[in-house]
């Protein structure tokens, strides 16, 4: 059964622009990027401050897709207690309960004000967000989390591989995109969760399924949502793309030797999940908005097709590496 999609139209603020201070970055990474990175510097102490933390901002050179990703999107109901509060190109999901809400992902640093505005436009309090979780700790999904934590006071739960990245704002060495990964503001109160662990907030329950490969800490989240007597299993399936910086090879990586086996484990997990509604960190990766418009969001085959497409893309990447 497809749920009703209530659309809400919000006036969103223009993208957040912060003061820019120079930020010293690992010189080897600067060399590999071939450009001088200048990002605004958030004081590490900002999380303890009562003032809004200065967000990192990325230039169009550093992040050519950021402007498009961060285009405003009016929030809307996905199903039951689950709402889309992200930007046009980066998902952020609010699972709402008056006794405490859960937020999944925070976009890039500049996405946070729009996500907060979307939550408020729905009539909810950002202060009701008690827990923030993440798909994977790249700047386009975890970049806004520090500011969202500051605004809400929420705790954060993440996989053991993602947690240090979210705490530091710095990519880990085993990240296939390590050499080009943009830093983001560090968060506090990040606790680690186990594969298969269910996290509870009020009456809400959301389960972590580790689906590594795109990053070692990649996590898919599942929960059940009801509208009256109709209940659906929702899955926020992490990115499964074999994207890397130049010089990283999925077929033979010293930094991430298990990457191919990890990807396969994740595909198998995605195929095994109860999955009525598929949501992805990049909405375009699963034609999310098209499926919303067509009222075809409830589709128990969507996760299996998502995994199959990802498996084929990884096989193509492996074949390319072996032939070069
Ligand atoms: Zn990513």
Image (tube, rainbow, N blue to C red):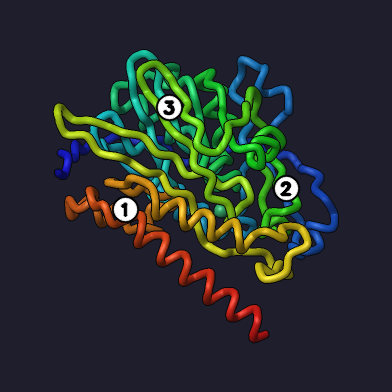
Residue 147 point in image, percent of width and height: 56, 29
Left or right, residue 282 beside residue 302: right
Residue depicted at x 37% and y 13%: 99
**Is the residue marked by circle 1 packed among few (<14), some (14-19), or many (20+) residues within 10 Å?**
many
For mark 3, does the 10 Å Cα neighbourhood hold few (<14), some (14 to 19), or many (20 or more) residues? many
The numbered dot on residue 288 is 1
Residue 85: give x, y in percent of width and height: 37, 36
Image quarter where the C terminus lies is bottom right
Q: In what element is the residue under mark 2? A: loop
Residue occupying the point 67% across, 17% down: 48
Outermost residue, bottom direction? 323
Residue 297 in percent (x, y) is at: 24, 50
- Beta carbon of the mark 1 residue lies under 8 A of ligand 1: no
Specify whether residue 139 is in view: no
Name the quarter where the N terminus is drawn.
top left
Q: Is mark 3 within 8 Å of ligand 1?
A: no
The disc, 2 or 1, on the residue closer to the chain's N-terminal end is 2
- Among all residues in the image, which is located at the extreme right? 27
Number of on-image labels: 3
What secondary structure is marked by label 3? strand
Gap between marks 1 and 3, in whole Å?
20 Å
Disc 3 target residue: 102
Say which quarter of the image contains residue 304. bottom left
Q: Which residue in the protein does label 2 denote? A: 172
Query: Residue at the location (16% across, 34% down)?
Result: 230
The answer as to whether callout 2 falls within 8 Å of ligand 1 is no
Looking at the rendered structure, the secondary structure element under dot 1 is: helix
Q: CA distance from mark 3 to mark 2?
A: 26 Å
Mark carried by residue 119: none
**Residue 106 screen position, x and y as percent:** 50, 38
Q: Earlier in the sequence, mark 1 or mark 3?
A: 3
Q: Residue at x 60, y 60 (%)?
A: 261
């Amino acid at each position: 059964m497809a749920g009703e999609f209530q659309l809400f139209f919000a006036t969103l603020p223009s993208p957040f622009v912060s003061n820019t201070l120079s930020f010293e970055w690992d010189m080897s990474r600067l060399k590999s990027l071939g450009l001088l990175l200048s990002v605004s510097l958030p004081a590490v102490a900002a999380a303890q401050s009562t003032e809004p933390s200065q967000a990192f901002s990325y230039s169009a050179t550093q992040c050519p897709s950021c402007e498009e990703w961060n285009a405003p999107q009016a929030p809307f109901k996905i199903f039951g207690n689950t709402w889309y509060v992200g930007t046009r190109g980066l998902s952020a999901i609010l699972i709402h309960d008056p006794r405490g809400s859960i937020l999944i992902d925070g976009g890039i640093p500049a996405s946070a004000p729009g996500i907060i505005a979307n939550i408020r436009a729905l009539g909810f309090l950002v202060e009701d967000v008690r827990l923030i979780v993440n798909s994977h700790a790249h700047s386009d999904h975890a970049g806004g989390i520090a500011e969202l934590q500051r605004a809400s006071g929420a705790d954060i739960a993440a996989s053991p591989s993602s947690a240090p990245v979210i705490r530091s704002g710095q990519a880990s060495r085993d990240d296939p995109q390590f050499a080009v990964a943009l830093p983001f503001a560090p968060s506090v109160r990040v606790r680690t969760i186990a594969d298969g662990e269910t996290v509870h907030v009020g009456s809400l329950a959301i389960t972590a399924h580790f689906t590594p490969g795109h990053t070692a800490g990649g996590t898919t989240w599942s929960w059940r949502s009801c509208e009256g007597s109709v209940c659906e299993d929702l899955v926020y399936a992490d990115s499964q793309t074999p994207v890397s910086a130049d010089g990283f090879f999925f077929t033979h990586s010293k930094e991430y030797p298990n990457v191919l086996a990890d990807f396969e484990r994740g595909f198998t997990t995605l195929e095994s999940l109860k999955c009525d509604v598929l949501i992805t960190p990049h909405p375009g990766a699963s034609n999310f908005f098209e499926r919303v418009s067509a009222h075809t969001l409830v589709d128990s085959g969507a996760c299996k097709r998502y995994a199959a497409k990802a498996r084929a893309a990884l096989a193509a990447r492996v074949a390319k590496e072996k032939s070069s």
